Amino acid sequence: MNGLVSSILEHYNQWVTIFLMVAGLYVVVARGNMVKKLVGLSVFQTSVYLLYISPGKILGGTAPILIDDPNAVYSNPLPHVLILTAIVVGLATIALGLGLVVRINEVYGTVEEDEIFERSDDE
């Protein structure tokens, strides 16, 4: 039992990533409100950021600047650079989604999927 608890505590960042991923996916699939779906998408994107950044840091690793020590351990900067790009793309995606939700609300008067489907069937 003690080994299980220590294993969970050693990898807490992976557990947080899994929880956020499942929670975000659940909100996207289970909710009918489009704004809530965008919030779920944002939570899911955050979990993907954590998924890539967590293994990118090496304990005891230094910045990738060449030094005279041949035994130096370097952290890889590539995951962090990729995540910066992903954050910008994620913000643009959420902004576009919110813009579409505003336009849908203007046309249909609601952001609930069920009500929009009912109103589009009537037309």
Image (spheres, rainbow, N blue to C red):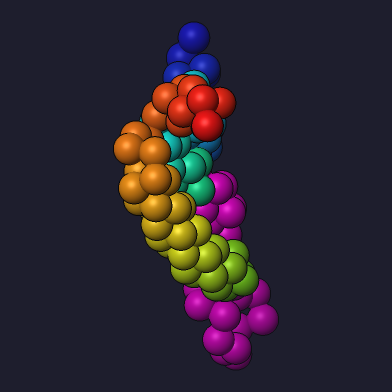
x and y percent of residue 95 in the render? 40, 60
Secondary structure character of the magenta stretch overall = loop
x and y percent of residue 69 in the render? 60, 83
Give 88 or 75, whichever is nearer the viewer.
88
* Residue name at image x 50 percent, y 73 percent: 62
Instruction: Please state the extent of the stretch shown in magenta in the rendering.
Output: 47-74
* Residue name at image x 58 percent, y 54 percent: 52
x and y percent of residue 61 in the render? 53, 67
Residue 110 placement, left or right of 14: left
Residue 7 in view here: no
Give 47 or 98, whichever is nearer the viewer.
98
x and y percent of residue 89 in the render? 52, 65
Residue 110 higher or lower than 71, as above or below:
above
Residue 63 higher or lower than 10, as above or below:
below
Residue 67 in view here: yes
Residue 91 placement, left or right of 65: left
* Residue name at image x 51 percent, y 77 percent: 63
Q: Is residue 52 magenta?
A: yes
In the rendered image, the residue lying farthest to the front is: 123
* Residue name at image x 46 percent, y 14 percent: 2
